[in-house]
Image (cartoon, helix red, strand yellow):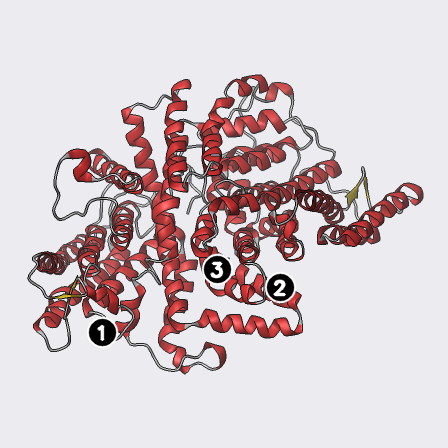
Amino acid sequence: MTDQTSTGRRPEDEPEDVLPEGPVLAEGVDEDPIEKNRRLPVGWRATAIAAFAAVYAFFHLAALNGLSISRTTGIELPLLPEMPMETWAFRIVHIAGALALGFLLFSSRFFSDDRPARDTKLVGYAALALLIPAALALATALGFMADINSGTLPQMGGLTTWAAFPGTELYTTEVWWYGVPLLIATFGAIVLGWIEDRPRDRFPISDMVLAFCAVVVAAYLIPIYGTAARNSVGTPFVPVGVAFAATAGSALILELTRRVAGMALVIITGVFLAYTFTAHLLPGILAVQTPYTWQRFFGFLYTDAGILGATTAVSSTYIILFIIFAAFLQASKVGDYFVNFAFAAAGRARGGPAKVAIFASGLMGMINGTSAGNVVATGSLTIPLMKKVGYSKRTSGAVEAAASTGGQIMPPIMGAGAFIMAEITGIPYTEIAIAAIIPAVLYFVSVYFMVDLEAAKLGMRGMREDELPKFRDMVRRVFLFLPIVILIAALFMGYSVIRAGTLATAAAAVVSWLTPHRMGLRALVRAFEIAGVMSIQIIAVCACAGIIVGVISLTGVGARFSSLLLDIADTSQLLALFFAMCIAILLGMGMPTTAAYAVAASVVAPGLVQLGIPTLTAHFFVFYFAVLSAITPPVALASYAAAGISGANAMETSVTSFKFGLAAFIVPFMFFYNGALLMDGSWVEVLRAGVTAAFGVFLLSSGVQGWFMGARVAWFLRVALIAAALFMIEGGLMTDLVGLGLAVAIYFVQKLFHPRPDATIPVRGAD
């Protein structure tokens, strides 16, 4: 749902060949796209939302850096713990804030300028009535909080007990005064939200009820998890109120995920939820011995083994920190500079705009966490230019989709998946970032070769000098890279990721004073507001992925899948890897990268580790294929976003982007056969592996494109080129020599015998 620009116009509505006169200058690349279901409040509503989003983002920055409300202000807030908060409480607040902000900002339906709002006053009144049970649930939760903080309850092992057993008055209160009213308000407001229709600048009452319910869930869970009841989660003795709160919280997460990320992840999560309660009826590896009760399952779900687990741990720390960093860069217009720098550096090469797309998308990938978002940010400028110099519509969109997808594997930030990898594996983030360097280079080199050979086949030119920004002007502003440099330097100097990210964020504000976009107090508040809004989708997605992780953890289906991989590996280890690849791609189709990797890491990676594959290699394997699902037909989010801008057929664009990213589907198998590609080996081994793999990628691109050393090649030479590429990519000394010898033989056959190519040269601009 990111196919609409911040001006409210869809990119596909723009004239295809209307380009600026004079030099091409990127403007507005940093602007946050306006989704078609995002509300645009005005007046006091806009002020309230801006303040909410800014405070929400600043709260995280303060908490992560160990600031205390009472220490810094002298104001004692007895109902709020000092920051840094207890881990579970911090994550519960993190999710509740995103839910409340998300329901106020994102509608259940798409807005249309030519569709007037329907009269749904009766629905509004019904939604207003739901505030009564919601308020009752909140009052009950606050009463529980007061009881727990009163010091009158008995202690067990230093923790307050919470004896809400069936038949007790406390149990009855939890069910009828908290749980049932909360579920009535939550599910009633979700249903009414699908019906209630309000103008784009107003908040529907049903969505305000949902935001209120998010607060009610947190108001109960935070104090309860501070008692001995926390030790009973996942058992039949978990307080029934926890199950009620978790049920309502899960429903809120699924509904917000539907609004901000589409139905794909919601459907997959629904399948896993259905599996939980039907697993005892299923055969084979999917079966469990005994059915799970509703209370036990949902009492387990809202814990650090599920929703509050690794995915939320990362979204509440590293991800939101780097979203704040990206927002500060956005406020200082660094994205525009990145794209203009790319035009100045690569625009003169043949097929220049396509190479600009590769360069710019790699740079933007460091500050943009999604493949589709990267496409929208840079593609609205690069795709029309690619079409202008001769690329077809589908090729223009495919190049942008493939390049933007690569931004997710580009160090140092690598989207959110790298942080989740560090959290799950325990491997230091800096080690992951270093290991990602050669694979990222291979990916972008592969796409570069593909577009360069395509340009050679079509006889394209580069852009003229007068069409490009002046390189000397770009060099004068190279200091805008300083926040990125500080981030990398701080990480490798041993600073924590949080401290390094905070220093880089501060550097972005300081650097802005050397530009026309100086960040004063108002700009700082605006940056925090942008960060709060930008974080909603990724937080919802991470929490939703946590539901799937919770199901896998409780049912043990991941371990049984690992056993299946071991059985396949007895026949062929390569077959087991291929099977793991297919599962990782299927799990990732239609899902944002973060959720795709989180799920694949729970299902696939443990099985690969049991095969004897090193932990880092196994997780990189599934991470890459989770990322590549964005350009893999038939459900390729990045390709579909690019097709919307280029005007090409979405499926044709996804097939072409799959072709341009083909080398990336081979790279993960290279990890398995040659660990030097992940910096595991001596510098000589690493250097040789990188150089030979890069040459292999060139041969593969030549074979796929049918263009080698300045001429088209016959079909049998294309097959030989692909074979030579695979020998070079495999990584052994003998295979490298075989691949090199085969490449030399192909070159001499091409030069001496001039075999006639069977394919015809495509027509420029043909689609």
Farthest residue toward the right? 752
Q: Looking at the image, do the residues carrying marks 3 and 2 touch, with CB atoms under 8 Å apart?
A: no
653 with respect to 201 (left or right): right
Picture coordinates of residue 24, whole percent (x, y): 55, 24
Comparing marks 3 and 2, which lies closer to the viewer? Answer: 3
Q: Quadrant of residue 509?
A: top left
* Secondary structure found at label 3: helix
Of pointers 3 and 2, the one earlier in the residue sequence:
2
Mark 1: secondary structure: loop
Question: In the image shown, does 26 or 628 lie closer to the viewer?
Answer: 628
Q: Earlier in the sequence, mark 2 or mark 1?
A: 1
Q: Disc 2 residue type?
A: Phe
Q: Which residue in the protein does label 2 denote?
A: 578
Local SS, label 2: helix
Residue depicted at 32% across the width and 41% down the height: 533
Which numbered disc, 1 or 3, marks the residue that appears first in the sequence?
1
Q: Residue at x 59, y 37 (%)?
A: 358
> Measured from the top left, where is residue 383 in percent x and y?
56, 36
Front in this rendered view, residue 608 or 447: 608
Q: Which mark is residue 255?
A: none
Q: Residue furthest front?
A: 157
Determine which of the numbered discs, if any, sits on residue 601 in the image: 3
How far is the residue under mark 3 from the one under mark 2?
16 Å
- Classify 10 Å Cα crowding around label 1: few (below 14), some (14-19), many (20 and above): some
Q: Nearer the viewer, mark 2 or mark 1?
A: 1
Residue ID for mark 1: 237
Kind of residue indicated by mark 3: Ala
